[in-house]
Amino acid sequence: MSPAAEVALAEGLHGTVREPSVAATAAGRTRPAPRRRNVLPGFGLALGFTLVYLSLIVLIPLSAAFIKTAQMTWPAFVDAVSSPRVLAWRRCRASPRRC
């Protein structure tokens, strides 16, 4: 263990201190250790596409609805929420037999 690692452990920093991983060859040169393969290849790319589509399809329209509502005055909001069309929708959602 290096002196810096011993000092870090002596000062109370918990955790495993590891030296850089290199494998020695017969000629005395060092080469980086082989990379560990992921169980799910392409996971990072798939996650990136998922987040882009989620933001385009869901988050942007949802934020636009909140921004539009925040710009309304209180009487305009009450009028929009208590319109006959909205009340009929709420009755239909609460009890489908009443539609």
Image (tube, grey):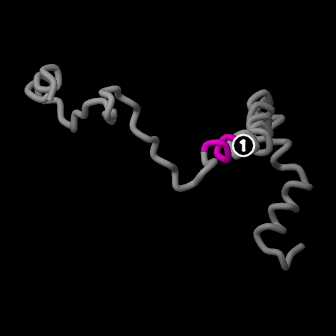
Q: Which of 66 and 38 is in front in this view?
A: 38
Horizontal side of residue 38 vs 68, given as left or right: left
Element at label 1: helix
Residue at image coords 91%, 55%: 85
Packing grade of label 1 (10 A; few <14, some 14-19, many >=20) is few
User: Looking at the image, can residue 21 be seen?
Assistant: no
Indicate yes or no whether the magenta region holds residue 33: no
- Where residue 84 appears, as percent x and y from the top left, is 91, 55
What range of the chain is rendered magenta? 44-48
* Residue kind at label 1, given as amino acid type: Phe
Magenta stretch: dominant SS? helix
User: Looking at the image, can residue 96 be seen?
Assistant: yes
Q: In which quarter of the image is residue 64?
A: top right
Q: Nearer the viewer, residue 43 or 81?
A: 43
- Where residue 38 appears, as percent x and y from the top left, is 52, 50
Residue at image coords 14%, 29%: 1
- Where residue 65 appears, as percent x and y from the top left, is 79, 38
- Where residue 94 appears, as percent x and y from the top left, is 76, 69
